[in-house]
Image: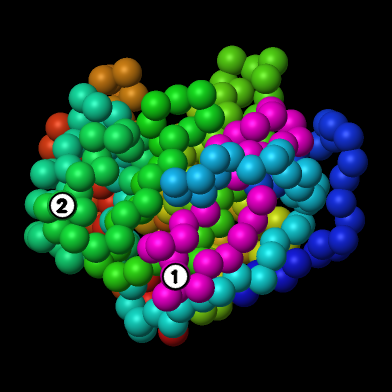
Amino acid sequence: MLTPKNPANRITGISKKLACSNLVSRPVASFEQDIGHFEPFYAYAFIRRTEPDQKASQPHFGYPRLGHWPELTCLCYPECMRVISWNVLRRIGATAQDLATIVHNRQPDILLLQEATADIDRVTSLIGGSFWRQSMPNRNHGLALWSPKPFPALTVLELPFDPKSRSGDRRIAAALQFADMLLVNVHLAHGQRLLRKQLRYIVDGTVGRVAIVGDMNAVGPTSLAGFDDVGPRKRTHMAKGILPVRIDRCLVRGITCGRAMVLDRGRSDHHPILIDLDCL
């Protein structure tokens, strides 16, 4: 469950603290017709909001993203939720047909993708369902979601970054609210200190059940207080084609895992991970 903190504490001018996106909720009945998606407007303090078939609205002065979450419309979820997360390796990796195959073979409730490009968008023409995608700031690839059912409330967060650092590329996270469980799709920075800062930023202000899944780029324990790493223990990537690493993970709080396994990687350089989350 998410709890807002100090929603009236607006900022004025350009704050040097990172600000959140213009967080909104969408009732399920209108979600497919009225999807709010977000693109970065200014590196530190602004997010520009756009709507389908509409011009961009005026820049929105957000709240400081330090413990602030809105109340979100939500859906009930089954006792067990099957999640597959896969870094598909941009345009040279897994295709929409590969996604259709893994959905047919594994029957996930939700598919979380990283490094997804516009080439993936046609997946709904192959298998139907609901699909959402947004590129990382200043990149042609980013996060994507697929589900056989309509999505619940979707929130996009712009994560902390260090413009002076070599590993300080800007990242976003996509969060879905299922009843009292929050599911977050991530592709974190390569810098080990920065990615852990991004993880803490995501969970700041949340209470109750949370699952963070995706390509975390983390070497060693993440040391996220209150969270358990329930993802598969096998390696999911070969760094530089030489070093086996387990960087695709699932961190949970208040949730148990019935099964976790690594799947064949196909054309990507990452193996998909499958996790059965016991939500109740």
| Residue at x 24% of width, y 27% of height | 91
Which quarter of the figure has residue 192? top right
Q: Nearer the viewer, residue 57 or 269?
A: 57
**Is residue 122 shown above or below 90?**
below
Q: Does the magenta stretch include residue 28?
A: yes
| Mark closer to the observer (1, 2) | 1
Q: Disc 1 on helix, strand or loop?
A: helix
Marking on residue 125: 2
C-alpha span from label 1 to label 2: 21 Å
* Badge 1 amino acid: Ser
- Residue 192 at least partly seen: no
**Is residue 111 shown above or below 142?**
below
| Residue at x 51% of width, y 24% of height | 138
Q: Does the magenta stretch include residue 149?
A: no
- The range drawn in magenta is 22-49
| Residue at x 75% of width, y 58% of height | 68
Residue 26 screen position, x and y as percent: 53, 67
Residue 205 appears left or right of 183? right
Which quarter of the rendered picture does the N terminus lie within? bottom right
Q: Are marks 1 and 2 in contact (CB under 8 Å)?
A: no
Residue 230 screen position, x and y as percent: 41, 60
